[in-house]
Amino acid sequence: MVEREKSESTLTVLVALGANFAIAVLKLIAGVITGSAAMLAEAGHSIADTFTEGLLLTALRRSSKPADRAHPFGYGKERYFWSLMAAVSIFTSGALFAFYEGFRTVFGEPEEQTNPLVGYIVLALAFVLEGVSWLRAARQLRGEAAAEKRTVRQYLNLIDDPTVKTVFFEDSAALVGILLAFGGLAMHDVTGSSVWDGLASVLIGVLLAGVAYLLGRTNMGLLIGRQADPAIVRGAREMLADTPEVEVVVDLLTMVTGTDQVLLCARVDFVDDLTSADLEIVCVRIAGELHERFPDLDEVFLEPVPRSDPELRARVLARYGTTP
């Protein structure tokens, strides 16, 4: 299952990479021919997206390395680092260039537009190519959301694979950006004023900055150490509480350590009549049952504790405001 999702993510990124590279070349040629600021801004947008896909491929490759002595929990979080770099790339290479072209055109000398038909044709081709990439990302998102019985919006909020989310967001922004560039090109053509072209470029910059912020915030949360899917947390707690040898689940901590990888630490008050040998066997059994029910639980640690310990209770209360 994990390998299949990884393969799908890789294919989604490769499709986006090929589409964005072709689009970047077409837009750059059209921008030089037409002199359109919005077209040049869109060329910068597509170039940034191409770099982004390269970073996402790096994320997929490096995050799949097995755990070793230096990184006992694996390299899963590398995917979040390189995806964060992709968000930075969208802002620095795409948004800032679009702002520059837009403000230069709006406040600079009026510029004459040449061969707008070339721009219209290139934008139409770009829309088709971006649409193919967007459909690929959307199909993967819908399939994964349906498999977890969630809406696409809910899945996007909880997803721990930033690669497909990045492709989906940047392709959505690309389609909107193409429409903005088309509008700026058309208004410049109709009115003869390059201000419209500049305004379209500024709006493209705002769009890219917004996408970069959303993606950056997502990856920042995953890098810091986000809690696992609430369904896993809730299910693991209920499963522990229903175990005959467990009296009370004192504390339950989870952290996403990579795509489809979750670390779970549970502090549990076991029944008093267990011997040390019994306790060892029970802990091994419970860890196996948890992993079988929730395959994302990559590592499970169970700590026997007394529920009445004042220091432990204080720490739990400080974190949750109440005893779980």
Image (spheres, helix red, strand yellow):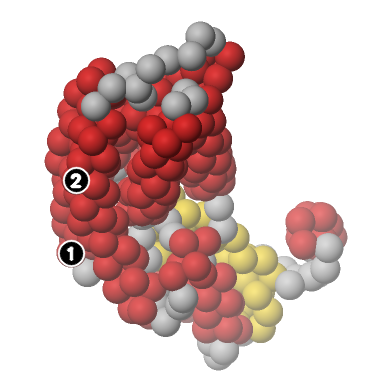
Mark 2, other Cα within 10 Å: few <14 / some 14–19 / many ≥20: some
| Residue placed most toward the observer, 299 or 174 | 174
When asked about the image quadrant of residue 322, the answer is bottom right
Q: In this image, 40 relative to 243: left or right?
A: left
Residue name at image x 58 percent, y 83 percent: 238
Q: Which mark is residue 4?
A: 1
C-alpha span from label 2 to label 1: 31 Å
Q: Which residue is mark 2?
A: 125
**Rendered position, 113 above or below 242:** above
User: Residue 168: where, in percent of width, then height?
Assistant: 36, 53
User: Residue 92: where, in percent of width, then height?
Assistant: 45, 23
Q: Give the number of the mark in front: 2 or 1.
A: 2
**Rendered position, 64 above or below 9:** above
User: Residue 258: where, in percent of width, then height?
Assistant: 38, 50
Q: Earlier in the sequence, mark 2 or mark 1?
A: 1
- Kindly tell me whether residue 297 is visible in this rendering: yes
| Residue placed most toward the observer, 260 or 150 | 150
Residue name at image x 24 percent, y 27 percent: 115
When asked about the image quadrant of residue 178, the answer is top left
Residue name at image x 51 percent, y 9 percent: 109
Residue name at image x 55 percent, y 20 percent: 106
**Rendered position, 256 above or below 322:** above
- Kindly tell me whether residue 81 is visible in this rendering: no
| Residue placed most toward the observer, 60 or 313 | 60
Mark 1, other Cα within 10 Å: few <14 / some 14–19 / many ≥20: few
- The quarter of the rendered structure image containing the N terminus is bottom left
